[in-house]
Image (spheres, grey):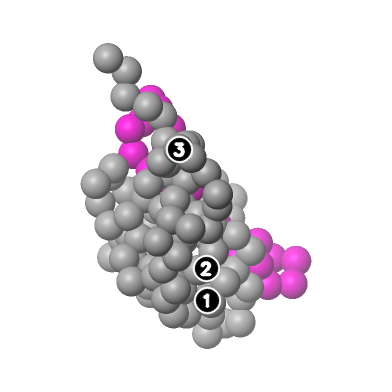
Amino acid sequence: MEQIKDNMYQIDKAELLQVIMEKKNALWRLCQICCSFPKAEQHYEVTYSFSSGYDFVQYRLIAEKDEWVPSISRVYNSAVFYENEMHELWGLNVENIKVDLHDKLYRIDVETPFLPKEEN
């Protein structure tokens, strides 16, 4: 785990479930999961945000375009919606989502509309 800035840490995939379990056991609340795909970087940035009282912390996971990220929905039930959204809008591969909505969360006509399109 590497500190990026105040209250933000970069973690790798192997650390994700350990960090999630530590937060859950300490009664931290999952605030949100944010996914982005910076075009210049060509990888996903998935940021998990937690709060406890007035304390707030974020963990950022870097994932390659074809990489699978483990689901945290069996620990935090609300993660089901974030994970389905990340898959549907960004194309992030999330494995073992507790309730996989199979790209039916939103009524959209375009596959992965937030993912930058390949330029020819």
Q: Are marks 1 and 2 in contact (CB under 8 Å)?
A: yes
* Quarter of the N terminus within the rendering: bottom left
Magenta span includes 38: yes
Magenta-drawn segment: 35-59
Displayed quadrant of residue 56: bottom right
User: Observer-nearest residue: 31 or 6?
Assistant: 31
Q: Give the answer, above or below, for where 82 lies relative to 18.
A: above
Q: Residues within 10 Å of mark 1 (few under 14, many from 20)?
A: some
Provide the residue designation for mark 2. Answer: 79
Q: Is residue 93 above or below residue 65?
A: below
Q: Residues within 10 Å of mark 3 (few under 14, many from 20)?
A: few
**On residue 110, which mark appears?**
3
Considering depth in this image, is 46 or 56 the residue closer to the camera? 46
Q: Is-magenta flag for residue 92?
A: no
Q: CA distance from mark 3 to mark 1?
A: 29 Å
User: Can residue 60 be spotted in the picture?
Assistant: no
Prevalent SS, magenta region:
strand
Q: Which part of the image, by quadrant, shows the C terminus?
A: top left
Which of the marked residues, 2 or 3, is nearer the chain's N terminus? 2
Which residue is drawn at the image coordinates 28% and 42% (left, top)? 65
Foreground of the two, 85 or 34: 85
Amino acid type, mark 3: Val
